[in-house]
């Protein structure tokens, strides 16, 4: 069964019982390079596999933006 | 090609100078391209500049504050425009992506604009696409 969430502003159907980790895996996104916000709260990466998506959840995924001259 | 108004160019240079001795960073936004989107010949016009906080506060690296980044991404979406480019400054080196820039280039559709302040009286600004670790310089039109 599917539920509908709002992912980066667009409705998307995902599998019921899917965790944030599962969502990132489906989207082929490495957890260590993205910030995840769920219903206006930034999630700690350690909790991605413990948080399960619910109907109408609002999720924002933004890749890190960084760089610089470095070394 | 990236089309940037002279006022926006001046703004990112001024921001880069103001952030010294640290690197500055920001986001450029504009309408979706109608020509060759996501291809080498895409034409993107900037109509908004977002100065962002460099959470690293470093002369050698930048990292955008996540909360601020989310706020700006949502605002851009609500305006019906898109993120066109990510800019940052190199305070003492040339306007060319470093290996660290390439490592953290996760937006292949965006331009990466670099402001070099190596010669502070004559800043050099160049734009690049970074896709699959490959750097390609992009034409910039200032108007």
Image (cartoon, grey):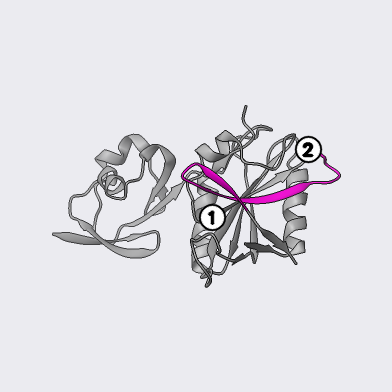
Quarter of the image with the C terminus of chain A in it: top right
Direction bottom: furthest residue: B34
Relative vertical location of residue A58 with respect to residue B114 in this rendering, above or below: below
**Residue A31 occupies which quadrant of the picture?**
top left
Q: Is residue B134 found inside the magenta-colored segment of the image?
A: yes
Magenta: main secondary structure equals: strand
In-image side of A23 versus B135 (left or right): left
Q: Can residue A44 be seen? A: no
Residue A9 horizontal/vertical position (percent): 40, 63
Q: Residue at x 68, y 59 (%)?
A: B140
Question: Are callouts 1 and 2 both on one chain?
Answer: yes
Label 2: chain?
A: B
Q: Is B78 positioned to the left or the right of B45 in the image?
A: left
Answer left or right for B63 relative to A38. right
Query: Which residue occupies the extreme right position in the image?
Result: B121
Residue B57: which quarter of the image?
top right
- The residue indicated by pointer 2 is B118
Which label's residue is closer to the chain start, 1 or 2? 1
User: Is disc 2 surrounded by few (<14), some (14 to 19) or many (20+) residues within 10 Å?
Assistant: some
Please name the residue that numbered disc 1 is placed on. Answer: B110
Image disc number at residue A11:
none
């Amino acid at each position: 069964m599917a539920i509908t969430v709002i992912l980066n502003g667009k409705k998307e159907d995902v599998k019921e019982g899917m965790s944030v980790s599962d969502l990132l895996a489906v989207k082929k996104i490495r957890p260590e390079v993205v910030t995840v916000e769920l219903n206006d709260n930034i999630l700690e990466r350690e909790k991605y596999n413990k948080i399960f998506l619910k109907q109408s959840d609002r999720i924002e995924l933004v890749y890190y933006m960084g760089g610089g001259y470095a070394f | 090609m990236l089309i940037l108004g002279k006022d926006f160019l001046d703004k990112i240079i001024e921001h880069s100078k103001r952030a010294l001795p640290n690197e500055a960073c920001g986001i450029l936004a504009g309408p979706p391209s109608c020509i060759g989107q996501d291809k080498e010949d895409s034409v993107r016009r900037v109509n908004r500049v977002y100065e962002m906080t460099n959470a690293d506060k470093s002369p050698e690296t930048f990292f955008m504050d996540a909360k601020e980044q989310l706020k700006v991404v949502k605002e851009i979406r609500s305006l019906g425009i898109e993120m066109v480019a990510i800019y940052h400054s190199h305070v003492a080196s040339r306007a060319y992506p470093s290996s660290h820039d390439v490592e953290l280039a996760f937006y292949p559709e965006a331009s990466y604009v670099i402001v070099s302040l190596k010669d502070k009286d004559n800043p050099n600004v160049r734009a690049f696409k970074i896709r699959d670790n490959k750097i390609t310089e992009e034409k910039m039109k200032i108007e």
